[in-house]
Amino acid sequence: MDKISKSDFISVVVGIKNEIRTTQYRTMQQVNSNLIMMYFRIGKILAKNSKYGNSFIKNVSTELTLEFPDLKGFSDRNLRSMKLFYDEYENDIFWQQLAAKLPWWHNMLLIQKIKDLGVRKIYAEAAIENGWSRSRLEEQIRNEYHKRVGAETHNFTRTLAPEDSVLAEQTFKDPYIFDFLTLREKYKEQELERAMVERIRDILLELGKGWSFVGNQYKVTVGKEDYFIDLLFYHTRLKRYIVVELKAGKFEPEFAGKMNFYLSAVNDFVKTPEDGPSIGLILCRDKDGFTAQYSLQDINKPIGVSTFETGKLLPEDIMEQMPTEEDLNLHIDIEEQ
């Protein structure tokens, strides 16, 4: 009997694990799809018998609860939601198919919050693509995701292939909402970077699916000089590195030149032949769109310029009174002793 190498064994196990996870995901999708379409059909029955008045649905709920005591979801309120669901998509096959890919309460949230079907479609597809929870979907609706996606200033249409340009536009937003960050009123780029790294999980959720964090203050050496990139990401769908530079103030034209330099360095010294040319994202507190676009027009590397919004900015005197991370760690150590 041949002896398998450790690396080959790991490869086999990883392959099996991936098959299991894929099957589990597909099974969950199928179960959800069947459940959603059952609700749709129940809604149809209720709609066809709506002539019997308000008490009719309440009586149906009572009968179903008695017949299926271990099943939840057949309350008077939920049955009315099923009827609403049917009424909304009665003659729309596209939406019936799209809704079947979303959890029930995602569908209800979209119907209740967004009346424009075109806008609703943006949120439905983004929720499926990014795996948003219901609370995350609600947050994105509140922050007007549909107005922010693809709104960044960029030169993608000139510097990327058409299919890559479209995907890049869909990947970036303007503004980014970092409302989970708390900073002093007059913060510096280093404080912003540190806060973002400390909340990297939340940052990745806001950035969207496909973003993978590589590192902050990422060193690239050009000649005899070392240079440090604020944040470096890799995007698994774009298959290329994304260089992010943070600016605490308004966009200035010289930012584009510096980003162009960083992209050259990453392309020459970091990316592999399998990776596409890197993309730059300049994140500023504010920008003039015309100035940003004018600054990019003669640059032949893909760069986007977006703004960002943070959480509440604390006055300097209050911020100074707050304990630092070192203070909190010291307090923990004392308690443990």
Image: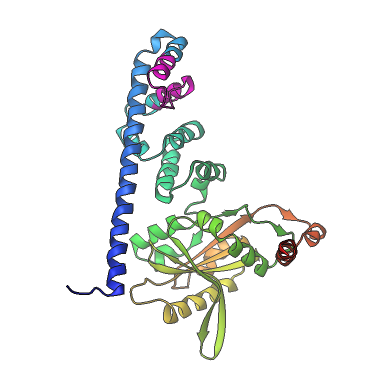
Q: Is residue 334 visible?
A: yes
Answer whether residue 81 is magenta in the image. Answer: yes
Q: Position of residue 260 (x, y in %)?
A: 50, 75
- Vertical side of 231 occupied by 207: above or below: above
* 261 or 21: nearer the viewer: 21
Q: Is residue 260 left or right of residue 178?
A: left
> Measuring 43% from the left and 77% from the top, which residue is drawn there?
267
Q: Position of residue 290 (x, y in %)?
A: 56, 61
Give the main secondary structure, helix, strand or loop, of the magenta stretch.
Answer: helix
Quarter where residue 334 is shown: bottom right
Q: Is residue 250 visible?
A: no
Quarter where residue 18 is shown: bottom left
- Vertical side of 37 occupied by 334: above or below: below
> Measuring 32% from the left and 58% from the top, which residue is drawn there?
17
Q: Position of residue 270 (x, y in %)?
A: 44, 78
- Vertical side of 58 occupied by 81: above or below: below
The residues colored magenta run 60-85
Image quarter where the C terminus lies is bottom right
In this view, which residue lies farthest toward the top? Answer: 52
Answer whether residue 159 is magenta in the image. Answer: no
Q: Position of residue 112 (x, y in %)?
A: 50, 31
- Vertical side of 128 occupied by 50: above or below: above
